[in-house]
Image (cartoon, rainbow, N blue to C red):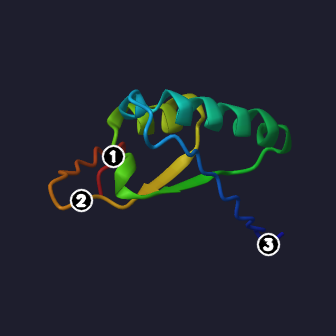
């Protein structure tokens, strides 16, 4: 059976919120989306811009929601990849 992909655009507009850096409103929104789409057993890939560079946010996406993610990073970000099965 071929994979079917659907795009869902999701945006929270609270850029001037003084608590913006803790991403609580983003997590609440993603939890709401998850409560709807988890009924359908979709594989989810979150694509984010560099403004969302937060280890806590992406640990939430990966560990709590069990989604995959792709984020565009700024040049000052270091990336480490820990392989379960080394190549």
Q: Position of residue 50 (x, y in %)?
A: 35, 56
Lower position in the chain sequence, tag 3 or tag 2: 3
User: Is residue 13 found left or right of 19 in the rendered image?
Assistant: right
Which structural element holds mark 1?
loop
Q: CA distance from mark 3 to mark 1?
A: 33 Å
Q: Nearer the viewer, mark 3 or mark 2?
A: 2
For the residues labelled 2 and 1, say whether their Cβ atoms are less than 8 Å apart: yes
Lower position in the chain sequence, tag 2 or tag 1: 1
Label 1, residues with CA under 10 Å away: few <14, some 14-19, many ≥20: some
Which residue was labeled with disc 3?
2
Q: Residue at x 39, y 47 (%)?
A: 52
Q: Position of residue 57 (x, y in %)?
A: 43, 35
Which residue was labeled with disc 2?
74
Q: CA distance from mark 2 to mark 1?
A: 9 Å
Displayed quadrant of residue 36? top right
Which residue was labeled with disc 1?
53
Which structural element holds mark 2?
loop
Q: Position of residue 72 (x, y in %)?
A: 36, 61
Displayed quadrant of residue 37? top right
Which structural element holds mark 3?
loop
Q: Residue at x 58, y 55 (%)?
A: 45
Identify which residue, 29 or 85, lies in the foreground.
Answer: 29
The single residue placed furthest to the bottom in the displayed view is 2
Q: Position of residue 68 (x, y in %)?
A: 53, 49
Q: Count every numbered label the image shows and give the total.
A: 3
User: Is residue 78 found left or right of 29 in the rendered image?
Assistant: left
Lower position in the chain sequence, tag 3 or tag 1: 3
Q: CA distance from mark 3 to mark 2?
A: 35 Å
Disc number for residue 80: none
């Amino acid at each position: 059976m071929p994979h079917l992909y659907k795009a869902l655009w999701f945006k929270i507009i609270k850029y001037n919120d003084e608590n913006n850096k803790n991403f609580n409103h983003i997590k609440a929104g993603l939890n709401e989306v998850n409560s709807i789409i988890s009924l359908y057993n979709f594989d989810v890939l979150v694509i984010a811009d560099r403004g969302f560079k937060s280890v806590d946010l992406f640990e939430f996406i990966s560990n709590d929601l069990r989604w995959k993610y792709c984020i565009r990073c700024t040049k000052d970000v270091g990336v480490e990849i820990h392989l379960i099965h080394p190549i």
